[in-house]
Image (cartoon, grey):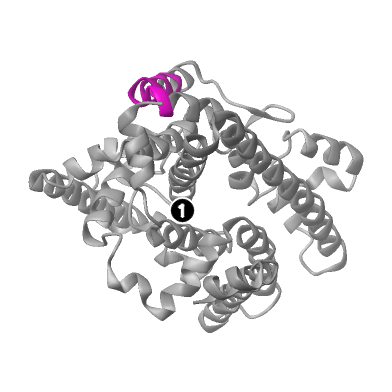
């Protein structure tokens, strides 16, 4: 293992910002998945080129590199790799259970409710004619029901990460360069995973892997991030790019203002290329992360603010909260299309969803604490 990487991993301390980011991403994904909801106008995707998916992929890459890099440091790489594969299995198991229950629920609701069109909206129209075929293709990740694409993306990214971790621990810069080369090749040659019969994945893993590797690279190197923060001119450039991205995005939302945008901005930048992770989206996310980490250091007292603990707890239990959020977003959408779709109803649906996701996160945290020995349980609650 490279000595500088070993030192960075050994010096890492708990960083609540990682869980806060995952919690924000979970809440954002939930409201973004409810169409015609005024609350989702406040999420990141409406103010720039990146969105909640970028937060998920980067932070998970950062966190996995830290956790399993330290494990490799203490117990060896083989143990760390097997623990990553165990996480892959948990992701896959969660996806399969969610996939089966989710599409069955949608099919049942579509056949029994006043909204039969949702079966087409959620991209599972074949479930009624060929249920077994749809289920089998779902098991091999060749079906992509609406709102499950992000969880589907995380499975190959995590399965790929043991190899990434091996490279990051020994040659982090070479590993990052190889990741960028794969990203460029996938965009150039139009490589992607396929969805039956002839569609591509919404999130191309061969491109999105670069963002996850970037997260791991920042985690194990550490020093470049601190060096960058000592460059005021870089903060100015990052801030200017964020303002530019916000202006373009907001103007494009308004037909009157979009008329003032040049054609290359109107047609070339927006809508953002989510599938193949366009470079300006990556740049926007990195600028946002750079400014955010400068304004909110790891020891910022605001991270201990009580209202933020709910979001942080949702980040700590991000997988379970994400799965619950998928069902809640479907339920919220169904409520709004079959009832009075008033602004107050949209806000109420979103608040109830946030509360339910938080309740699930706190319950899982409490349940895990009960399985600890008494001494450790008392220490965890203090």
Left/right placement of residue 102 relative to residue 276 reads: right
Task: Please state which of residues 198 and 45 is positioned toward the viewer in this rendering.
Answer: 45
**Residue 82 percent coordinates (x, y):** 64, 34
Give the residue drawn at x 27%, y 55%.
Answer: 293
Q: Residues within 10 Å of mark 1 (few under 14, many from 20)?
A: many
Give the residues drawn in magenta, as a range. 169-183
Picture quarter containing residue 161? top right
Residue denoted by label 1: 52
Whole-percent x, y for residue 274 in the image: 47, 40
Task: Give the position of the N terminus as an image quadrant.
Answer: top left
Is 98 above or below relative to 156? below
- Predominant secondary structure in magenta? helix
20 up-or-down from 366: above or below: above
Q: Is residue 107 left or right of residue 380?
A: right
Q: For residue 267, say whether it is visible.
A: no
Q: Is 312 a magenta residue?
A: no
Most foreground residue, 88 or 258: 88
What is the x, y in percent for residue 69? 47, 38
- The spot of residue 292 in percent (x, y) is 27, 56
Residue 179 vs residue 109, the one in the foreground: 179
Q: Residue at x 62, y 55 (%)?
A: 319
- Residue shown at 37% from the left, 22% from the top: 171
């Amino acid at each position: 293992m490279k000595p500088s990487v070993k030192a960075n991993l050994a010096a890492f301390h708990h960083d609540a910002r990682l869980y806060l980011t995952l919690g924000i991403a979970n809440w954002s994904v939930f409201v973004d998945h409810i169409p015609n909801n005024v609350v989702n106008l406040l999420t990141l995707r409406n103010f720039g080129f990146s969105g909640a998916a970028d937060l998920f992929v980067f932070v998970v890459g950062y966190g996995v590199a830290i956790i399993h890099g330290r494990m490799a440091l203490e117990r060896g790489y083989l143990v760390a790799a097997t623990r990553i594969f165990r996480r892959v299995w948990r992701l896959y198991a969660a996806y399969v259970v969610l996939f089966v229950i989710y599409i069955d629920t949608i099919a049942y609701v579509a056949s029994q409710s006043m909204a039969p069109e949702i079966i087409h909206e959620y991209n599972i129209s074949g479930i009624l004619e060929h249920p077994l075929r749809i289920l089998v293709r779902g098991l091999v990740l060749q079906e992509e029901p609406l709102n499950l694409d992000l969880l589907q993306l995380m499975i190959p990214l995590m399965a790929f990460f043991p190899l990434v971790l091996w490279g990051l621990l020994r040659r982090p810069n070479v590993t990052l360069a190889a990741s960028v080369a794969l990203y460029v090749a996938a965009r150039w040659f139009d490589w992607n995973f396929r969805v039956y019969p002839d569609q591509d994945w919404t999130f191309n893993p061969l491109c999105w892997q670069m963002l996850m590797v970037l997260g791991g690279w920042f985690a194990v190197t550490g020093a470049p991030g601190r060096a960058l923060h000592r460059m005021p001119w870089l903060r100015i450039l990052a801030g200017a790019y964020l303002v530019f991205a916000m202006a373009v995005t907001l103007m494009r939302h308004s037909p009157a203002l979009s008329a003032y945008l040049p054609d290359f901005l109107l047609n070339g930048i927006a809508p953002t290329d989510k599938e193949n992770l366009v470079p300006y989206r990556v740049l926007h996310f990195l600028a946002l992360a750079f400014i955010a980490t400068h304004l909110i250091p790891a020891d910022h007292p605001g991270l201990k603010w009580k209202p933020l603990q709910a979001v942080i707890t949702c980040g700590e239990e991000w997988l379970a909260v994400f799965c619950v959020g998928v069902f809640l977003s479907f339920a919220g959408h169904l409520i709004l299309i079959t009832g009075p779709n008033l602004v107050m109803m949209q806000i109420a649906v979103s608040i109830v969803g946030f509360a339910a996701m938080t309740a699930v996160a706190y319950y899982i945290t409490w349940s895990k604490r009960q399985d600890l020995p008494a001494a450790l349980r008392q220490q965890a609650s203090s």
